[in-house]
Image (spheres, rainbow, N blue to C red):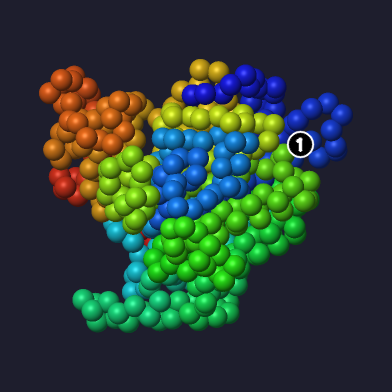
Amino acid sequence: MTTGAYRLLLPLALVAAGCRSAGEREDTERPPNLVVLFADDMGWADLGCQGAEGFATPRLDRMAAEGMRFTSFYVGGPVCTPSRAALLTGCYPKRVGLAHRVLFPYSDTGLHPDEATIAEVLRDAGYATACIGKWHLGHHAEFLPRRQGFDRWFGVPYSNDMDRHVYAKRDFTAPPLALYDDDEVIEESPDQALLTRRYTEEAVRFIAENASRPFFLYLPHTMPHKPLHASADFRGKSELGLYGDVIEELDWSVGAILDALEEHGIDDRTLVLFTSDNGPWRAESSGPLRGRKNTTWEGGMRVPCVVRWPGMVPAGAVCDEVVTALDLLPTAAALAGVAPPEVDGHDVRPLLLGEPNAASPTEAFFYYKDDKLEAVRSGRWKLRTGSSQLYDLEADLGETTDVATAHPDVVARLAALAETARADLGDATTGQPGANVRPVGRR
């Protein structure tokens, strides 16, 4: 990890308590705010600072220059629902019953109300909480954000392509896509070209209303999931066409959020994290990574991640240690000064804050797709469990060369780690149920 000449000025215990320096204001014990900006289907290479071509991301690039890029950041699944379940619960989606595909408008399941979410953990610590954007963890009332720890919700219940969609195999036609304001449907089939802007306006309003207290803002965007839409201010502006227009509008949204934090004088007491829910549907957006959305190649689950917290996260830093979306809940709980529930993720404050010689606390990361364990990563090595192909991700980012025969000891070690995952979480390929999985929520 590159941290330049940065040195921690405060011990981590003081960071968790939200302290800064001598002579500061009376609210020194206030913990930091947390803002999570979550794109939909945006690829690892869709940032200018990671090689994007045909469109510009100046605010994200500036955010990276003022903060840290995590270049080995993984989400919990290669599609929407599993990934969101992992981020909000800190657990593998297989553990909470949401690893199989995504939820549809005909689904009767959702995130179990008994699962502890990051919103519930932080709300119990005194935070105001808001989800503004796409939910996709169950569209029935008992599964919606206001039942999962969020004081405020403005957004849609699932993906934008599910609006009035005909599911022929189910003989089911989806209802119009609903736009919610808290628990009330205020529009049907809203103009999708305005969603990014409307989400951003609501997020800025939430920041203004809660600037004097700690808050958690979760902004899961609808874009760039297909069908693509951009507002009139951005349509036709990028060299690439509509996809580039959409990304540039998302970049504008990031800038609007950062500007709001600065305007209210809370810029340096707010940790902002930008990432994506899974890899892209657009192959070029994976850049050097193999694969894309709905695969367990790197392009399906390794996503862009930029974190900014002025004065705390070292500026211009790049961290290639394994960090995952599952780590967000325990890390946020530590920063808020509260104990997290039992989760699969880890507190990654040493990495986040640039502690010298910090290393990933993740011994093994498990790549699940549709309840099937397809790969495991440990350190530089990644083993595909079905074929026993081994890749050295430090030397071969694109997963082009199988080196299993040269490293039988590594294959054996990662295969043993995979067996521990199967015993714990299960594996549909081998038929193992998993000893420690929990029930999905059902109506």
Residue located 48% across and 46% down the image: 47
Q: How many marks?
A: 1
Q: Point out residue 68 in the picture as x, y percentages from the top left corner.
A: 55, 34
Residue located 75% across and 59% down the image: 209
Q: Quadrant of residue 226?
A: bottom left
Whether 345 is drawn above or below 194: the answer is: above
Q: Is residue 149 visible?
A: no
Which of the two residues, 379 or 97, is positioned nearer the viewer here?
Answer: 379
Please rate how many residues cluster around mark 1, counting C-alpha atoms within 10 Å: few if below 14, some from 14 to 19, many from 20: some
Q: Is residue 101 visible?
A: yes
Whether 228 is drawn above or below 423: the answer is: below
Asked which secondary structure carries label 1, the reply is: loop
Which of the two residues, 289 or 164, is positioned nearer the viewer here?
Answer: 289
- Furthest residue in direction front, as rendered: 239
Which of the two residues, 231 or 209, is positioned nearer the viewer here?
Answer: 231
Specify whether 261 is left or right of 39. right
Q: Point out residue 238 in the picture as x, y percentages from the top left corner.
A: 50, 59
Residue located 49% across and 53% down the image: 55
| Residue where numbered disc 1 is placed | 29
Which of the two residues, 428 or 269, is positioned nearer the viewer here?
Answer: 269
Residue located 49% across and 24% down the image: 1
Q: Quadrant of the C terminus?
A: bottom left
Q: Point out residue 305 in the picture as x, y percentages from the top left corner.
A: 49, 42
Q: Which amino acid lies under the numbered mark 1 shown in the image of this protein? A: Glu
Whether 53 is drawn above or below 354: the answer is: below
